[in-house]
Image: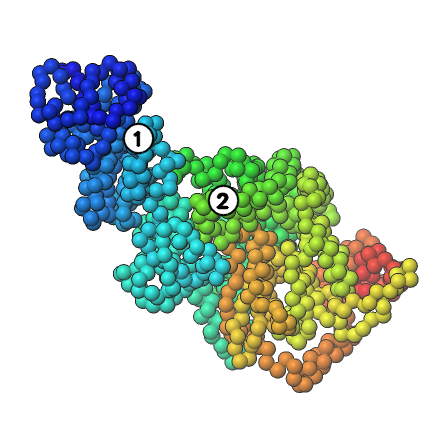
Amino acid sequence: SFNTLTVISQNVSESLVSSLIDINTPFMITDNVQEFADGENANFESVFVLSDFDSAAYSYLYKRENRVVGPPVVLYCATKGEPLQFSCRPLYCTTMLNLSLCFTGFRNKEEMKNLVNLVHHMGGTIRKDFSTKVTHLIAYSTRGEKYRLAVCMGTPILTPSWIHKAWERRDDVLFHAGDEAFRTEFKVPPFQDCVLSFLGFSEEEKSNMEERTLKHGGRHLEVGDERCTHMVVEENSVKELPFSSSNNIFIVKQEWFWGSIQMDARAGESIYLYEKPNDSPAMKKAVSLLSLTTPNSNRKRRRLRDTLAQLTKETEISPFPPPRKRPSAEHSIGSLLDISNTPETCKTLTGMRKSSKPSKSSTPAHSKQSARWQVSKELYQTESNYVDILSTVLQLFKLPLEKEGQVGGPILAQEEMKTIFGSIPDIYDVHTRIKSDLEDLLRDWTENRSVGNVFLKYSKELVRAYPPFVNFFEMSKETIVRCEKSKPRFHAFLKINQAKPECGRQTLVELLIRPVQRLPSVALLLSDIKKHTSDDNPDKITLEKAIESLKEVMTHINEDKRKTEGQKQIFDVVYEVDGCPANLLSSHRSLVYRVETIALGDQPCDRGENVTLFLFNDCLEIARKRHKVINTFKSPLGQTRPPPPLKHITLMPLSQIRRVLDLQDTDDCVNAFALVVRPPTEQENLLFSFQLAAEETVKNTWLRTLCRHVANTICRADAEDLIQCTDPDSLQVSTKDMDSTLSKASRAIKKTSKKVTRAFSFTKTPKRVIQRAFMANSTPDEKSQMLSSENRLGSSSTLAVSSATSWFVSRTRKQSHVKHRCTVCPAAPETAVDLFT
């Protein structure tokens, strides 16, 4: 080994001399370094300290392979208390010490040679091939294998400006180019060298994406421009491309765009390529059914029934295979879940009405299920959907955000994570167990199985899990909005997941609001089950306790978190609609939309009726315009109120809507839509068709709003899938001649005919209603006589019913004073009187 003799050129600072003394290095100062460069000394190795690496002295020493260092190297070693760094290349500073760089995308060899020299002068090393030892990739473009490997391995990808800026700070001894705060501004933007166009997005969304394209180093042009390198497609709305694809352009889904921003690097296009969506076989079959017509009216009705069943087939949930009905079982899970949504079942039910012999083409029919069973199944379906949504929140949002080693570092801080998601894991855990218990209950169903016990069992856990989340939901929402604005990677992360099928194009805020809405929905379903539960069933009392326990949970939720404006409008609806159900008034319910329409079918009212639809967040109130003006109501205080202009038809839970049909505009049908509904008491789907009457109502906006709230009610994320565009002719729906004199006269004759028939008919009350009323008002002897009469005459005989009807009407007349007594309080009449009032 040799002792080091440091030769220093002129213009030496005092700090440099002091540093050499500190590390015990002999030195000398000269103005002619060439005389030392030419000589050889057996006792010393010469190290030359130069402050200018562009001088003639440097070139002279470099060509003769002398060791050359810069003053910052001496100062650095003195600071560390180490001897002078050994380097076979000239070393000016330690700014890039321990950094290993790789280059890609460079075409100018002279520029690259200059950059390599600067890296060596700052203590860095260069590698030709990319490997795990490379710490930084210097890229001129976002293409190539090296770029892809660097993205996958999370290696920082920087522009050449990083090297130049680091060289400008070469005299700063404490500075290091690898500091994240310094290198961040030199990252290669994800869209560098990319020219993007956007297809299928709204103007607002397109403008947002174009702005972010410029911010992240790219350019944007209109669709079809030959200079475009990428076309970003909104895959949920684009069905056909405006031109044939070319090898010169990448046609990618929007997930590629947002994924690139989230990673802060251009994502690989191969896994994000756009593919033309294929219609599902069920939908193709439904369309083919819609396109068929037949001159036979009965066949038309059957075809319509089959079409409605096919259209709603994909909206039904069958969580487990339907078992065959056991001889000892009165009801089975399979018959329920398989009941309504296949054309074969519809045909079977139709055939059963016409004949006791099943048709050859029909499948074996299941027994008709009770309304209690139907609502219990609906409760399970919504619970299953709700658990799936909570799972989506955890799997797509919470867990990825908590994952360690994220490309580009953590997206959110831990405190922000806690504020956003709160007690969602606890809510998911308790509802997963509730879902499991409901599934076990439905698999071995009998009418005496207790649904209420399932929720009573977990009432304490619900009290612990829900209030902490619901009470701080507004804070959670504000945190999401704030982070989305201030953190582009978080915004991109949300956009990526929002486009996934599991999210149904809903934002994280829209998914997180589901726990806020869930408990009131469960309480409504339990109330519906209770309504269809007989008084002698022990579950009726249990259901009451379960409903009260849910109300107790909701009392722990701050009242100031609830919206009141929509609730105030409910009172206006109650006053406006004659006969409006009292249970419409609810603390959790609010009015969302009001639409004026004209009925186009025979349900839920006669064709041509002016119908008003009141959309609430969980139900749909259907009311028609009154045919005649009634007397003005006068309150006990002497104040008068105008008569209600509308007559109540039905209050339908949104969960009964199976499909929303957007009817295409034709010469015979304009601005119309239809609802495929399925009440729990019905075994087949019903079609409600309407024409929008108000010009200011935008059909698309109305239908999307309706579907969104239907999806919220049944806890589904894919609201868009509930809408189906349909040909009105095949559904036998038409708006033609609605205002003609002949049409109006026909409707008037039909109404008069119904009134006359109703006035002279004793069979207008359903047989079962009469029997229930008879049994409720009969003595034990009369009940046994009625039952024995039924057994003798059989179900097809009407004699027993006629006798019961006459006896019942007679008994009703004797109690007519009860009817008059209950005029002031309509809720008080006895069952028998109430049935015929």
Image point (12%, 23%), residue name: 36
Q: Residue furthest bottom?
A: 742
Left or right? Give the position of 832 relative to 324. Answer: right
Q: Is residue 653 visible?
A: no
Left or right? Give the position of 639 relative to 326. Answer: right
Q: Which sits in the foreground, 169 or 232?
A: 169
Residue holding disc 2 = 486
Instruction: Please tell me whether residue 57 is drawn above or below residue 19 in the rendered image.
Output: below
Instruction: Please tell me whether residue 358 is drawn above or below residue 300 in the rendered image.
Output: above
Frontmost of labels 1 and 2 is: 1
Q: Position of residue 28 (x, y in %)?
A: 19, 19
Q: Is residue 35 visible?
A: yes
**Rendered image quadrant of residue 759:** bottom right
Instruction: Classify the position of the C terminus by image quarter.
Output: bottom right
Residue type at the position of mark 1: Asp
Q: Which sits in the foreground, 207 or 435?
A: 207
Which type of secondary structure does the marked residue at label 1 adopt?
loop
